[in-house]
Every structure is written in C-alpha cells, then in structure tokens.
Amino acid sequence: MSAASYKPRLIALIVAAAVFMGALDSTVIATALPQMARSFQRPPVDLSLGITVYILVMAAFLPISTWVADRLGARGVFAGAIAGFAVSSVLCGLSQDLGQFVGARVLQALTATLMTPVGNLVMLRTTEKKDLVAAVAISTTPGLVAPVIGPALGGFIVTFLDWRWIFFLNLPIAALGVFLALRFIPDLRAEERRPFDFRGFVLTGLALGALIYGLDRVSASGRAWEGPAVLIALGLGLGVLAVRHSLTAPHPLLPLAALRIQTFRASALTGGVFVRLPFRAFGFVLPLMFQVGLGMTAFQSGVLLLGYNGGDLLLKSIANQTLRRVGFRTALVASALLTAAATLAWVLFTRATPFWTIFLALALAGAARSVLMTGNVSLTFADVPREEIGGATVLSNVLNQTTGAVAIALAAIVLNVSSALRGAAGHPSLQDCRLAIAVAVALGLLAVPSFLALPRDAGAEVSGHRRPA
C-alpha cells in the first residue's frame, strides 16, 4: 500500500498526542519533586535519580525501537507502548518509596522509547514527501506546548490535589491514544526480518549511557570532575567501537548509511546539532535568568516562556509556504541568522527592562526559530529512501538525545565557570546567564556553513520549491 493511501495529518495528530503525553510528563514532574521527597521521607536531591534514570534508559534503548517495530508490527508496538506508558505512570503514582518510584520510571522510560520514535517512524513511512512539512509541524507542536503549560499544571496539581495525580493525568490521554492507534495506525512491518544486533546494542547502549551520565554529573558535580571525565572518555571510546561495528556489521542496530546523504547529514548531524544545541540550552538557562538574574517569580517566568514558544507556534502555519517559496537552503540560512540576532538581544535585558518588552523580544526570537526548526526536521528525511527511513529515524533520535544532554551540560559548565571566576561558585548571576546565551548563539551560528553548502534545490520534493527556468 502506498503512502498516498494513508491519512498523514491524522497519523501526525495521533503521534502528536503521544509526544504531548511524554513531554508533559517530563515537564510537570520537576514541580512535584519537593512534595514527593516529603512523601518518601527523603531529601529532595535524591529524587533527581528518577529523572536521571529515565534519561539513561531512553538513551540505551532508543536504537532498538525500529527493530522491534519492524519485527512485531508498528501498530501493535505503538499502541502497546502507549498502554505501557499509562500503566507505568499509574505505578509511579502508587509508589510508596524511592525504590518503587525509580523502578516505575525505568518501565516508563522503556515504553517511551517505543512510543514516540515508533510513532514518528510510522508518520515518515506513510507521508508523501509533499506533505512532510505539514505533518512535521503538527507532530512537533506538542513539544512546544507541553513545556509551557507543564510547570503551571504541575504547580496547580501539587498545590490543590496531590503529586500522584500528575501521573494519573496520563490515563485519559493514553486511553484515547490507544483507541486511535488501533483504529488508524497501519500495521507496518519489515519485508525482510533482520537478526538482532546484540553486540551493537550493548556497545551503543553503554556508550550513550556513559556519555550522557558523565555529562549530567559534570553539570552537577562542581569541582569533582575526575569521575565524570572518566565516564565521558569511556562513553567516547565505546562510541568509536560502536561506530566501527555499525560500519562493518551486516545488519547493524544503528545503521549509518543515511549519513551519505547530504541533506540528512546537514540537518541531523552537522548543521542540525548546532541548531538544537541553543534550543536545548535555553530551556535550562532562561528560567535561571528570569528568576535569579532578573528577580522574577516562577509565574512571570512561565508567562515569558509562553511568549517564546508562542512565537514559534504562531509561525508554524506559514512554514510550509515559506519553504515552498524560497527553498530549504535559503530558509534555513536566513532563519538561522535571524534567530541568532533575535536571541542575542536577550543579553541586553536588565531588571529595568519592561516585562512586556522582554515578552515581545522572546516572541520575536521564537517566531524566527519556527521556520528554522520545522525546516531542519523536514529536511532530515527529505532525500532518505523509504526503505532506509527506519535506520535514519533511529540515528536521528540518538543524535537528538545526545545533543540535549550536551547542551544542558555545556550551559551548566559555562554558568559554573563564570560564577566561580566571580568568586560565587554555584550561584549564577544575570552576567553569567548573559554569557551562557552568547555562547549558545555562537554555537548556533556554526550551523550556517552546513546549510550554505546545500544545493539551491535541496529537498525540493518536500518543500515544493522549484528554481525558476
């Protein structure tokens, strides 16, 4: 059955619901940690284990998502993952101590590993190239909405109900998701069964786990850098072995073949990494800047983040037309430069800057970022053959997860080093946040050369842009 036989927008909406559930869960849990710590009679810092173990399990098991979907069928795996996420969420809510909670979070991470990647895999395999930009805009929108409403929703639940309802909230969303998945998601399977690459799974999982945990410890360990440095070095060394294995194995769990395609390489690895680094870093730096540097309340900080992500959402509807009119190369280069300029303006914020001036500046940066993010994600799979979509999806997900960890670690390192040089180690100020923003902007500009090297008609089948005769 061809991609034209499916309903790409409906499938994108179903995937969006799963993305929203996972993203919302990740954002509201931070608000509940103090109350959960009192309930478990543990120090609040101990509860960070529930977040760290989730990230580690996700990183280790991401590569198996496509293999499982190809072997067992995408519809059953996707629906089962949503149901499993709901069950594990209930177990989180019923936890009576830290050990039970961490165990439930491990199960939740395992199901999330299959939920969003498999959903995206189905969307990419069933969407015609010409509809890909619109489908990507729909499926990525929840990733912007959830971080905006998550902290406020979590605060409301913790204040007026109980922290356990944060996890029970997933039940109605999951029930709807399972029904829609079983009704509308096609049961795609690989025509040829591939053997499981156990060696590749072990090497890739250990490499990602050691690297991400080492980066997490660097950002939280202060001066005790020796242990995290060993972990990072171990992760990099295992990563080299994993890459060598993927290049020589007949059926690698993490195929690297898509890297031969210029558009995939530019959007997923070279340019794409530098596009995502600032985006992930700002999610860490901005709340600190608003609340610590500018003396705002958590509510005011949330309103400003609403403006930032709202600006992005506002322009999602015209991303398709923009790419069709000017093409991927021009759109990505121009939006990268505009995003950098609009974001760099944040270093001018002071306590005297009017609130609504900051709001508008953030909304402008979010609007500039909209075409950049949508275009970059859409270009990733523009020229990937349909039979290689599975491997390319796995590789893209792994790069995304690793980039997020690197971004937060780099932001934390800049803040820690800058504050230490001022003699206030561990207590970042407005000046330190400004420096972190400037460094992130500089890293973002490194994406421009990769996009400039693209042909003028790169990804034309997706964007619909044609060079004039």
Image (cartoon, grey):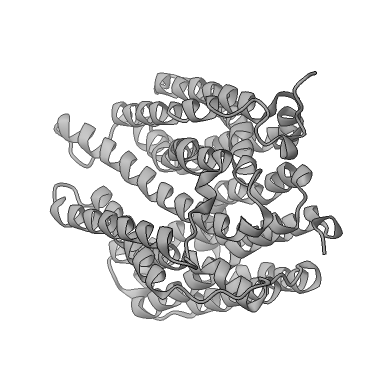
Measured from the top left, where is residue 195 in percent x and y? 51, 77
Q: Is residue 24 left or right of residue 14?
A: left
Task: Write the residue at 50% across / 68% down.
Answer: 251
Residue 256 rendering spot, x and y as whole percentages: 48, 54
Q: Is residue 288 above or below residue 347?
A: below
User: Which of the pair 234/305 is nearer the observer?
Assistant: 234
Query: Residue 249: image x %, image y %?
Result: 43, 66
Q: Quadrant of the image for the C terminus?
A: top right
Whether residue 165 is visible here, answered yes or no, is: no
Left or right: residue 137 versus residue 227 is right
* Displayed quadrant of residue 81: bottom right
Residue drawn at 48 percent across, 67 percent down: 250
Q: Nearer the viewer, residue 206 or 15?
A: 206
Q: How many marks?
A: 0
Q: For residue 372, which quarter of the picture?
A: top right
Q: Nearer the viewer, residue 124 or 199?
A: 199
Give the x, y percent position of residue 7.
83, 57
Report whether 98 appears left or right of 447.
left
For the view shown, which residue lies furthest in the right direction?
5
Residue 18 versus residue 46: which sits nearer the camera? 18
- For the point 37% across and 72% down, which residue is it? 199
Image: 230 above or below 105: above
Which residue shows up at 50% across the image and 79% down it? 91
Q: Quadrant of residue 181?
A: bottom right
